[in-house]
Image (spheres, rainbow, N blue to C red):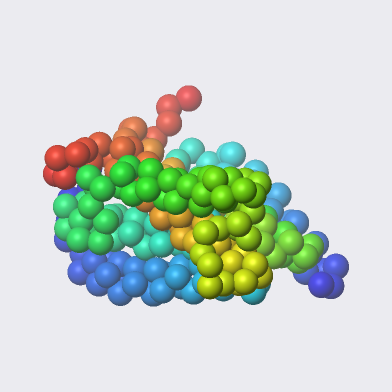
């Protein structure tokens, strides 16, 4: 659908804005412990940066950050991290997603909950980001071949 | 939050929603719907739900707009009705 744009303004603006949006997304993801934000919003912001590149400079030129082949696999990996952390807590004697039972011996329960939530948020971020990019690629028909 | 600002936000909300329903140009309707979504986010933040408002601003005003534009480019430009 969208070939590489002829306008240098759109291309330069997209290439300049996308890293700023993604940096804001990473900040929102790590700030989710202390205030508003978290994995979902950070993942959507990271996906918005990639989608801006997909729109601005064309699908074939924006494969460098996230390739169209790997989106669905990364989405499944994120969901696996999310659910697998909870299931590990079940296997070691706790409830589902009771991070105090994670098998890390040198951390106390409070620290274990802290880093367990961070680990789950990493899974949510990967799943949301690559899921939205996969939706965009499927809408445009940018298939597994990676051509536009 | 003073009530005048919230009143102004609600007026922008209703006007942008009605305009996005009236417009025949689908691309302009998507832009107006983005204004609507961002105003919803501002109202939610003014009511104290910062997390909900943040999610609404990111998803409704960012990604959904892109998806609507892509869906419109897959169809013909104008609506004939």
Work out whether residue A61 or residue A8 is closer to the camera in this orientation and state it: A61
- Identity of the residue drawn at 62% across and 64% down: A113
x and y, in percent, of residue A140 in the image: 28, 40
Q: In this view, does A10 lie to the left or right of B33?
A: left
Q: Is residue A7 left or right of residue B58?
A: left
x and y, in percent, of residue A33 in the image: 61, 70
- Identity of the residue drawn at 16% across and 52% down: A60
The residue positioned farthest toward the right in the image shown? B3
- Identity of the residue drawn at 66% across and 62% down: B51
User: In the picture, which quadrant includes the N terminus of chain A?
Assistant: top left
Q: Visible in this render: residue B5?
A: yes
Q: In which quarter of the image is residue B4?
A: bottom right
Q: Is residue A73 left or right of residue B1?
A: left
User: In the picture, which quadrant includes the C terminus of chain A?
Assistant: top left
Work out whether residue A112 or residue B29 is closer to the camera in this orientation and state it: A112
Work out whether residue B68 or residue B55 is closer to the camera in this orientation and state it: B55
């Amino acid at each position: 659908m969208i070939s590489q744009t002829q306008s240098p303004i759109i291309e330069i603006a997209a290439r300049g804005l996308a890293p700023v949006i993604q940096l804001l997304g990473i900040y929102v993801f790590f700030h989710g412990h202390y205030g508003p934000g978290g994995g979902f919003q950070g993942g959507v912001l990271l996906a918005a940066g990639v989608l801006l590149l997909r729109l601005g400079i064309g699908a074939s030129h924006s494969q460098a950050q996230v390739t169209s082949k790997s989106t669905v696999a990364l989405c499944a990996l994120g969901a696996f991290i999310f659910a697998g952390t909870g299931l590990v807590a079940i296997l070691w004697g706790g409830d589902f997603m009771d991070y105090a039972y994670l098998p890390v011996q040198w951390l106390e329960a409070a620290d274990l909950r802290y880093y367990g939530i961070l680990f789950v948020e990493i899974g949510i971020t990967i799943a949301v980001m690559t899921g939205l990019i996969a939706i965009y690629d499927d809408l445009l028909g940018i298939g597994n071949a990676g051509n536009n | 939050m003073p009530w005048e600002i919230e009143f102004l936000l609600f007026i922008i909300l209703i006007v942008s929603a009605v305009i996005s329903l009236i417009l025949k140009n689908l691309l302009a309707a998507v832009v107006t719907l983005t204004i609507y979504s961002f105003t919803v986010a501002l109202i939610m933040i003014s009511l104290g739900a910062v997390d909900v408002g943040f999610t609404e601003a990111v998803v409704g005003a960012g990604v959904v707009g892109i998806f609507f534009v892509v869906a419109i480019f897959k169809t013909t430009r104008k609506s004939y009705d």
